Structures are given as C-alpha cells and as structure tokens.
Amino acid sequence: ADEVARVAAAAPDWATLAAVNRPCVACPELAATRQHVVVGDVPSGGRPRFALIGEAPGANEDETGRPFVGRSGALLDQLLGEAGLSRSEAAVLNIVKCRPPGNRTPKAPEVARCSGWLRRQLELLDPPVVVALGLSAAKWFLGPRTVLAQVRARPHEVDGRAVWATYHPSAAIRFGPRGAPRAGLLEDLTAVAGALA
Ligand code: URA
C-alpha cells in the first residue's frame, strides 16, 4: 500500500498516473487473474463536473479495460439520462482497479493497497461532487461502519467534496425494475443533478 501510494503521489498528471497504474501487481491474486487494470474514464478537456465511483471491474470491464461497460453500465447510463446527467461530464472510477475472481467483493487489504491510486486520481481530477455507487465505495468515503440506507439521499462533506452514497446499479438489476434500489438510485442521481444545477 505504501509503495502504490508513493508511486501514485509522484504522478504529475492523469496520463502519467494511468501509465504507472496499468502494470500494477500490488495484489498478487488479482494481478494473476485479471486481463486489464481498469484505470477509469475521464472527460476530455478539464475538470469533471462529478465522479462516479464503483466497486471493482466486472467481466466486461476486465475484458475491455473500461469501467461500467457491462449490464451495470448500461443501466447506469440509462438512469443518468433519466436524472438529467451525462456520463460524458463525469469521471468514472472504481475503488479497486482489477477484477476480483468471480466478481467477489474486494478484500480489505486489496482496497487498502489500491487506495493510493484513487486518492491521487481524486487529487488530480478534483471533482466537486462524488457519487459513491454501492457499499464498498460508500465505506471508502464514509467509513467502515457505513449503512447505505442511513447515508443515502443527502451529501456528506469529505475533504471539501460533496459525497453522495447510493445503491450500486447491480443491486438495482438484482432487485428488479420495481425494486427499492433502482428507485433510490434514480432518486439520488436526480438529487445530484439538482445540486449541480
Ligand atoms: N461494477 C463496478 O462496480 N464497476 C465497474 O466498473 C463495473 C461494474
């Protein structure tokens, strides 16, 4: 974790950070099983209006090297549109940059080792608003005891940013089109759009 943090902190810009992140082997199991380090997407030209932060790449993301390109990404794009937001003005990042085998939840030491990358990404991109998608991202910003239902639907100030924590699109898929996570995710994205306006 210290080595990642040191290398990441030394990167002066996004392109350099991405280039040093891509060959990362800090987590032996993830490095041995992943296809790509999914560094994240950033809008071309300037500071993102907001950042969307997921948990870790899934199979489609691992294969393509891009974040949120599978089923979760399609639903995310749809709900962003319904909320009046566009992915093109957002940085799209993950807590952990490599796909965990079988899409298991990233382990605490993996999150800890990977944190230096995200910390430097946030420093360099400086998004004024962050949307943490799902519990792993919510915990990263708001602490390990975070309960999503208790923190969602309002911003929390963290290091000078407005952090919103909400459901992950995969939960919205799992619980179905009439489930609470989908409604909550859309409600929260709509509130974010209102706060950005
Ligand atoms: N789920 C995530 O949390 N992140 C991705 O990039 C894709 C799916």
Image (cartoon, rainbow, N blue to C red):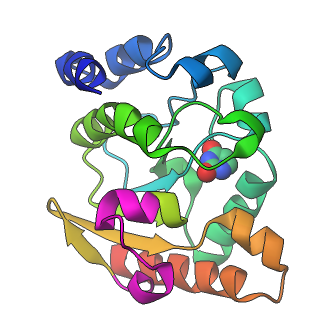
Q: Does the magenta stretch include residue 44?
A: no
Q: In this view, does 110 lie to the left or right of 67?
A: left
Query: Quarter-wise, where is residue 6 in the image?
Result: top left
**Highlighted range, magenta:** 137-154
Res 78 seen here? no
Q: Is residue 146 magenta?
A: yes
Q: Position of residue 19 (x, y in %)?
A: 42, 12
Please report the residue visible at 35 percent of the width from the left and 39 percent of the height from the top: 112
Image quadrant holding the C terminus, namely: bottom left
Q: Is residue 80 left or right of residue 52?
A: right
Q: In this orientation, which residue lies closer to the viewer: 73 or 194? A: 73
Q: Position of residue 82 (x, y in %)?
A: 67, 76
- Against 7, residue 145 (above or below) is below
- Against 40, residue 6 (above or below) is above
Q: Where is residue 178 in the image (x, y as percent from the top left)?
A: 82, 89
Residue placed farthest to the left in the image? 160
Q: Is residue 61 left or right of residue 96?
A: right
Image quadrant holding the N terminus, namely: top left
Please report the residue visible at 80 percent of the width from the left and 79 percent of the height from the top: 175
Query: Quarter-wise, where is residue 30 in the image?
Result: top right
Please report the residue visible at 54 percent of the width from the left and 18 percent of the height from the top: 28
Res 118 seen here? yes
